[in-house]
Image: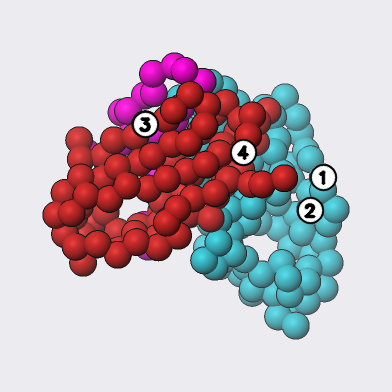
Chain colours: A cyan, B red
């Protein structure tokens, strides 16, 4: 069964710290991997998309890496800010055609303390 | 430009009633997805539309669920004879170049 797991489930850190969120997946034959943030009562916001042929993607203070052989991705957040507080979701597509949609982890609930 | 929109934003219904949820994708996006997020659970994929191809309905939880899409525009997700277990946030996404863009969701509560 293809599954996505995120660790930790929750994380609370002081403002300004760098932090790493972890995502693992059971089948290394992925098509792409996407990181999202979800704010309470709102939809998902796409942060970064990594294709299977890529090793990392960067956007501002965010950097996502992908290691297919070990079935892992990490989301690195530099110089964290209170506005980064949200739930971060990792999602994997194993089919480029989209027939299976995205498989999501349960997320990491992040709190940045001012 | 407008993002993915969904209506209603909230819906409260009585057990046994039918509900219809609507999704307006981003213009030009040929792919459209429906997901469900139950309280405390991860997102669960329901169904996917690509252009005019027939959708794969195997992800729908039961035969009470159905979905339609008119061409490459609006989609509706219908739940017949709702049950309390159907209470969840229903999210719609449309896709371009592999990135999925999500709407704000419809929060459904079945009493």
Q: Are marks 2 and 3 on the same chain?
A: no
Q: Are marks 2 and 3 in contact (CB under 8 Å)?
A: no
Q: Quadrant of residue A7?
A: bottom right
Q: Chain of mark 3?
A: B
- Res. A76 in view: yes
Residue B68 — which label? Answer: 3
Q: Are marks 3 and 4 in contact (CB under 8 Å)?
A: no
Mark 4: secondary structure: loop
Horizontal placement of B39 versus A28: left or right? left
Q: Which residue is mark 2?
A: A62
Q: Are marks 1 and 3 in contact (CB under 8 Å)?
A: no
Q: Extreme top residue here?
A: B53
User: Which sits in the foreground, A54 or A39?
Assistant: A39
Foreground disc of the pair 4, 1: 4
Q: Are marks 4 and 2 in contact (CB under 8 Å)?
A: no
How far apart marks 3 and 4 lie (CA) works out to 17 Å
How far apart marks 2 and 3 lie (CA) works out to 37 Å
Q: Quadrant of residue B67?
A: top left
Q: Residue at x 63, y 34 (%)?
A: B27
Residue B104 position in % (x across, y down): 53, 55
Give the magenta range.
B38-62
Q: Are marks 4 and 1 in contact (CB under 8 Å)?
A: no
Mark 2 packing: few (<14 Cα in 10 Å), some, or many (20+)?
Answer: some
Q: Which residue is mark 4?
A: B26
Q: Which residue is mark 1?
A: A58
Q: Chain of mark 1?
A: A
Residue B60, magenta (yes or no): yes
Mark 1: secondary structure: strand
User: Which sits in the foreground, A23 or B47?
Assistant: B47
How far apart marks 4 and 2 lie (CA) works out to 25 Å
Residue B54, magenta (yes or no): yes
Q: Name the image quarter holding the N terminus of chain A.
A: top left
């Amino acid at each position: 069964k293809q599954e996505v797991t995120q660790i930790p489930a929750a994380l609370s850190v002081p403002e300004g710290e760098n932090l790493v969120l972890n995502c693992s997946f059971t089948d290394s034959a992925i098509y792409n991997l996407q990181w999202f943030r979800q704010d309470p009562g709102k939809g998902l916001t796409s942060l970064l998309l990594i294709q299977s042929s890529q090793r990392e993607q960067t956007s501002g203070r965010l950097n996502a890496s992908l290691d297919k052989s070990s079935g892992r991705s990490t989301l690195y957040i530099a110089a964290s800010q209170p506005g980064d507080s949200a739930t971060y979701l990792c999602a994997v597509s194993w089919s480029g055609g989209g027939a299976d949609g995205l498989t999501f982890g349960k997320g990491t609930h992040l709190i940045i303390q001012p | 430009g407008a993002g993915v929109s969904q209506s209603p934003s909230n819906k409260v219904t009585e057990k046994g009633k039918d509900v219809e949820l609507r999704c307006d994708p981003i213009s030009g996006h040929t792919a459209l997805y429906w997901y469900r997020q139950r309280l405390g659970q991860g997102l669960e994929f329901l169904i996917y539309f690509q252009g005019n191809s027939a959708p794969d309905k195997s992800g729908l939880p039961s035969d009470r669920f159905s979905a339609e899409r008119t061409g490459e525009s609006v989609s509706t997700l219908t739940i017949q004879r709702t049950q309390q277990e159907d209470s969840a946030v229903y999210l719609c996404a449309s896709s371009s170049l592999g990135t999925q863009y999500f709407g704000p969701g419809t929060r459904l509560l079945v009493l």
